[in-house]
Image (spheres, grey):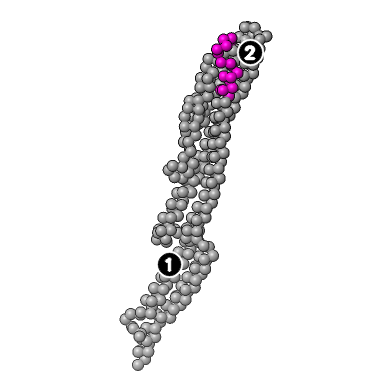
């Protein structure tokens, strides 16, 4: 039926034109941004999932930085322990020398002077060695490192006091000939065992941190791929959609022009009667 008052066909064609125009705009937006989801209306559920994945990704990247800081902290403590071990090695060497019966009291007193300097150096290292202002081996403490994107992803690192008192060396002397007094070499050996235990523990912690970073990198790759599948645009598909919408619009415009001519044609026919 052809109506002079309302051109139904024209309205239908215009509706299709609006749809193709919207499709073109959507494809252009996706092609320019590279994203399939540019606002919540594009995919409400997909946007929520992609946002959660984005938060996880940012958290994991920060966790890698945190863990690297943890490694640096452990390495700082291990370096200080290495210096303390050097002093202990020298103290033991001096103890062996002092216990030789050929030494006079004056000789042992001279040896004790160097030992005292080494003990003071051990205290200085324990008090001054720090990471970002935190003194690591001055006293017993546990420092938590956030190694993941979520609450509970924490590794606690235990640091032991390594001053001469903590090592049992606060009254260390090679001047006492009393047989009831512990042998100086045994005392130093026990102190060295304490240092070695702490160094071994910190080495194991460092290995664990490196394993954590490897795991985080793997998770970042997998999560990024999943997020990309949800929110990134398929370039080839969007180019195809754009071309299709453009062709439909061109056809629609041609049809609209033709349809709008129908009432004028009828009027001309009526005028000729």
Q: Is residue 98 above or below residue 253?
A: above
The extreme front residue here reads 180
- Write the residue at 46% across / 52% down: 53
121 sits left or right of 37 in the view: right
> Measured from the top left, where is residue 257 in percent x and y?
43, 78
Instruction: Name the secondary structure under disc 2.
Output: loop
Which quadrant of the view contains residue 196?
top right
Asked if the stretch drawn in magenta spans residue 176, the answer is yes
Which quadrant of the view contains residue 72?
top right
> Measured from the top left, where is residue 37 in percent x and y?
45, 59
Determine crowd level at label 2: few under 14, some 14-19, many 20+ residues with C-alpha closer than 10 A. Answer: some
> Measured from the top left, where is residue 13 in percent x and y?
40, 76
Q: Quadrant of the N terminus?
A: bottom left
Mark 1 vs mark 2: in front: 2
- Write the residue at 57% across / 32% down: 200
- Asked whether residue 163 is in view, the answer is no
How far is disc 1 from disc 2 in space, using C-alphas? 95 Å
Residue sitting nearer the eye, 178 or 230:
178
The residue labelled by disc 1 is 22
Could you say which disc has been placed on residue 128 in the image?
Answer: none
The extreme left residue here reads 5
Q: Which residues are magenta?
A: 175-192
Residue sitting nearer the eye, 76 or 251:
76
Q: Is residue 79 above or below residue 38?
A: above
- Write the residue at 47% across / 70% down: 245
Asked if the stretch drawn in magenta spans residue 191, the answer is yes
> Measured from the top left, where is residue 246 in percent x and y?
48, 70
The residue labelled by disc 2 is 99
Q: Mark 2 or mark 1, which is nearer the start of the sequence?
A: 1
């Amino acid at each position: 039926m052809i109506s002079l008052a309302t051109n139904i066909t024209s309205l239908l064609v215009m509706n299709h034109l609006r749809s193709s125009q919207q499709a073109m705009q959507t494809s252009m937006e996706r092609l320019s941004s590279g994203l399939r989801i540019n606002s919540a209306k594009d995919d409400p559920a997909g946007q929520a999932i992609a946002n959660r994945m984005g938060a996880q990704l940012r958290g994991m990247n920060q966790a890698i930085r945190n863990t690297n800081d943890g490694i640096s902290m452990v390495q700082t403590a291990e370096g200080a322990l290495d210096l303390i071990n050097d002093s202990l090695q020298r103290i033991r060497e001096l103890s062996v020398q002092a216990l030789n019966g050929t030494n006079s009291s004056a000789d042992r007193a001279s040896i004790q002077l160097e030992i005292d300097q080494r003990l003071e150096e051990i205290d200085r290292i324990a008090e001054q060695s720090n990471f970002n202002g935190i003194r690591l081996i001055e006293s017993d403490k546990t420092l938590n490192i956030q190694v993941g994107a979520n609450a509970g992803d924490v590794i606690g690192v235990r640091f032991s006091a390594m001053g001469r008192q903590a090592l049992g060396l606060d009254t260390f002397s090679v001047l006492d000939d009393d047989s009831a007094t512990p042998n100086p070499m045994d005392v130093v050996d026990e102190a060295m065992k304490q240092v070695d235990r702490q160094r071994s523990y910190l080495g194991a912690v460092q290995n664990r941190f490196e394993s954590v970073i490897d795991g985080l990198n793997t998770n970042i790759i997998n999560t990024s791929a999943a997020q990309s599948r949800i929110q990134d645009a398929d370039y080839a598909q969007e180019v195809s959609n754009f071309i299709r919408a453009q062709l439909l619009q061109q056809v629609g415009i041609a049809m609209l022009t033709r349809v709008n001519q129908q009432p004028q044609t009828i009027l001309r026919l009526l005028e000729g009667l």
